[in-house]
Structures are given as structure tokens and as C-alpha cells.
Image (cartoon, rainbow, N blue to C red):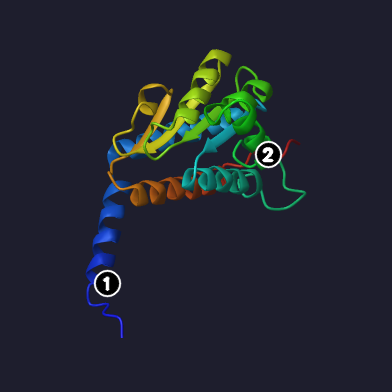
Amino acid sequence: MTDLSTFRPYLDDYVRETVATLKAPYLGEAVEKIAAIFLRARADDRTIFFFGNGGSSSTASHFVTDIAKVAGGTGASSPGPRFRCLSLSDNVPGLTAWANDVGYAEVFAGPLRALASKGDVVVAISGSGNSPNVLAAIAVAKELGLTTIGLTGIGGGKLKDLVDVPLVVPSNSMQHTEDVHLVVCHLLTAYLRDRQPAPAR
């Protein structure tokens, strides 16, 4: 039988470290700023673009799924405007075309340049904050006059100094960083759902 005597202490440590990251004061400050930006984007009918690699790519898709559906109300007849958002990680044929024909560093920057307009919002997700294709897309976003948000960890890397609102998870663990990014996704989804505008009379 496999020895699991070390599992319970490991579990307790993991949960304790994750909770500690969530209690960082500036983490809450960053989430509050992001919520305000999202609400303004909805009010102004702007598009919010999400992107990232690997686990961060799945988080980008998760954000779009939740915010587009749940934060706009769950029924087809729900009142008020919905969020217009898009994950640049989800178009696999387009992503592979950019990677093959131009280079992997351009897989987000290229589509963003084609799709975004001044006043839109980008949410760049990178655990290290140093992914070249994420940084390239942020450079395009700044050039186009977009509002930029960065979700990162492990010190924030280069990303934290390039975006308008950095959310840096105070952990050197990629697992804790990605855990907190998903918590932020669900927190924002719930908050934005509950801030659904009243229908016009």
C-alpha cells in the first residue's frame, strides 16, 4: 500500500499558503480596480480581451466563459447589457497560423492589432510575467490606446511594470499563483453578476 502519511501535513501547508496569498492587502486593491474597469467596459460597450499560455490560457478561457455568461445574467431574457469579451487563446487554427507563419511571439499581438479598438481592455495572464508573446501583445495594446491589466505572480516579472493595473500574487509558487487567478475570476464573476444594471423603464 502506498504510504500517504505525509499527505495531510502537505495539504494543510498548501491551503495555509494559498489563504495567505489571498489576504495580501494590495491583492484586494488590484481586484477592486479591475472590477471598476470591467464595469466601465460594459457600460461603454467595449471589448475585453484575455490571453495567456498553458494554465494561464485556460484561465483566460475560464474568465470569458464566466463573465460573458454568468456576469451578464444566466437567462436569455436577463435585463441589461452583457460583457463583450474574447479569449485570444481559443482560436486554435488562428493561433497556429500566427505561430507557424510569423512566430509564436506574435500569436496574441497579431490578432489583437486586428480586432481591438481604442478604449477596449486587455487582461494579460502570465504566472511569471515574462512570457514574450504576452509582453508583445501588451506593447500593441499600449500602442492602440487600450486599458491594460496584468495577472501575474512570482514577483510580477516584466509584465507588472508595463500594465495600467498589475495584480501580482505574492507567491513564488506557480500553483498558488494560478489558484489565486481562478479565485479572482470567480470573485469578479460573482460581483459583476450582482452589479447587473436594472432594466430601462
Residue lying farthest to the bottom in this orientation: 1
Q: Quadrant of the C terminus?
A: top right
| Left or right placement of residue 200 versus residue 27 in this view | right
Q: Earlier in the sequence, mark 1 or mark 2?
A: 1
Local SS, label 1 = helix
- Residue 110 appears in view: yes
Q: Position of residue 14 (x, y in %)?
A: 28, 59
Residue at the (40%, 51%) spot, across then down: 179
Residue 42 showing in the rendered view: no
Callout count? 2
Q: Amino acid at mark 2?
A: Arg
Mark 2, secondary structure of its residue: loop
Q: Nearer the viewer, residue 21 or 59?
A: 59
Q: Quadrant of the N terminus?
A: bottom left
The residue that disc 2 covers is: 82
Q: Residue at x 67, y 33 (%)?
A: 97
Relative depth, front residue between 70 and 144: 144
| Residue 60 drawn above or below residue 14 | above
Q: Which mark is residue 111?
A: none
Q: Position of residue 187 (x, y in %)?
A: 47, 48
Residue at x 39%, y 31% (from the top left corner)? 130
CA distance separating discs 1 and 2: 44 Å
Q: Is residue 22 left or right of residue 178?
A: left
Residues packed near mark 2 inside 10 Å, few (<14), some (14 to 19) or many (20 plus): many
Q: Given the image, on which type of amino acid does mark 1 rest?
A: Phe
Q: Position of residue 131 (x, y in %)?
A: 43, 32
- The residue singled out by tag 1 in the image is 7
Quarter of the image where one finds residue 106: top right
Asked if residue 145 is positioned above or below residue 35 in the image, the reply reads above
Q: Position of residue 2 (x, y in %)?
A: 30, 81
